[in-house]
Image (tube, rainbow, N blue to C red):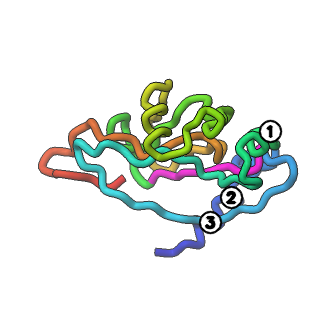
Amino acid sequence: MCREPLARAWETPALTAIAEAELQIGWSPVGPGTLPTRAVLGDRGGMWHRDAYSLFEDETVDLALPQYELTCLAPMQDLSRGEGGTEFVLGSHRINLSAMGLTTVEAVAEWAETQPRFEPAVKAGSVLLFSGQVLHRGAPVTAAPPAGKTSRNR
């Protein structure tokens, strides 16, 4: 697979404008990366995580900093809700999880299940652009795959 078109995706004027507006201290693209997965009915979803790593090993400091990381996902096929797209915990980019005692994968997952969440339907060729501090995961698969199939790529 040729990675060149993916590596140059940030040259799109709309994405460049958003990056310049949000990352006011300057920016440079990192990546691209791919994460092909299979969606199987009954999949309970991926691990809740943030893409932005702590810069100072102190979440209080990290959350006080200006926006320093954006994640851009580009689906390769249409995904409806329930087909295992990306699910977000709304408002989580402002929440200090460690201050709340949520320091394990299990504790974060348990907390996330009680919060308002959103799994957008997305079209192939569109993008999901979000702060790297937003808690997200591959959503559970609750929709059956197309007729005659037991799973599908996502």
Which badge, 1 or 2, is on the more N-terminal residue? 2
Query: In the figure, 93 relative to 52: above or below?
Result: above
Residue 93 colored in magenta in the image: no
| In the image, farthest residue toward the right | 25
Which mark, by number, is residue 10?
2
Residue type, label 2: Trp
Q: Main secondary structure of the magenta part?
A: loop
Question: Is residue 54 shown above or below 80?
Answer: below
Report the residue at 37% width, 37% height from top. 80
Mark toward the start of the polypeptide (2 vs 3): 2
Front position in the image: 32 or 97: 97
Mark 1 and mark 2 in contact? Answer it, CB < 8 Å: no
| Kind of residue indicated by mark 3 | Gly
Q: Earlier in the sequence, mark 3 or mark 1?
A: 3
Q: Is residue 17 visible?
A: no
Residue depicted at x 53% and y 33% = 89
Toward the bottom, the furthest residue is 2
Q: CA distance from mark 3 to mark 1?
A: 26 Å
Cα distance, mark 2 to mark 3?
10 Å
Residue that label 3 marks: 31
Which circle marks residue 64 in the picture?
1
Q: Residue at x 15, y 45 (%)?
A: 147
The percent position of residue 9, horizontal first and vertical second, equals: 63, 60
Residue 83 appears left or right of 3: left
Q: Amino acid at mark 1?
A: Ala
